[in-house]
Amino acid sequence: MYGRINLAEIDYDLDKDIKTTKPNLKEANEVFINYCLYKDFNSVHPLYQDDIDLYAWNCLYEEDKLVAWEQTMLYPNDKVAFSQQFAWDYKEPWKRIGWRFSYHVPAWLKSKGYKYLYLGDHHEYKSKIKGYEVLEHISKHLDGSFKK
């Protein structure tokens, strides 16, 4: 199953500390490596310079050091976006930085006139985000019965 956020349904505020800026590859990789080690992922694909160049980035810096980021693929003509990847260094896990991005990124996209933010595979925690919906079988989209 695949999920998205209907941005018309959210009322989150922008997080003043999260900036739309591209990090450099070295600092993005430092956060990514710490994130993957903390999560103990069995398999990951590396970050490339093209990841920095191709996507829009939202970054959180603390004391001028990158601590978390999210990369988003934008489709400006269709006003939809795809969340590609998120990472944070988990040095202070009690801060729940991931949730800050879960509220900020939809608010940022809504402020730019976007309609949907696609989040990839469904996971139960995503259903806590306002406007979250699980997409139906393709036949429901084609016949118009998926009206969310």
Image: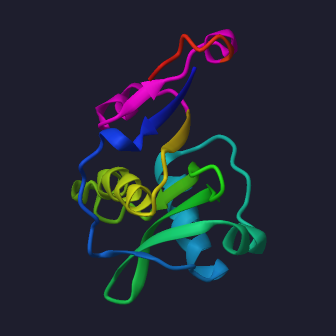
The location of residue 81, given as percent across then percent down, is 57, 51
In the rendering, at what x and y percent does residue 71 appear?
57, 61
Query: In the rendered structure, which segment of residues is drawn in magenta?
Result: 121-141
Q: Is residue 27 above or below residue 47?
A: below
Residue found at x 57% / y 79%: 22
Whole-percent x, y for residue 14 in the image = 28, 65
What residue is rendered at 22% in x and 55% in y? Answer: 94
Quadrant into which the N terminus falls: top right
Q: Position of residue 37 (x, y in %)?
A: 53, 54
Please identify the quarter of the rendering in which residue 54 is found.
bottom right
Name which residue lies at 51% across and 55% down: 86
Which residue occupies the foreground of this view, 38 or 101?
A: 101
In reply to whether residue 122 is colored magenta, the answer given is yes
Q: Up-down: is 7 above or below 138?
A: below
Compared to residue 2, the image places residue 68 above or below, namely below
In the picture provided, is 137 more to the left or to the right than 101?
A: right
Q: Which color scheme did the rendering employ for the protein? A: rainbow
> Would you identify the image quadrant in which residue 130 lies?
top left
Residue at (36%, 42%) from the top-left corner?
8
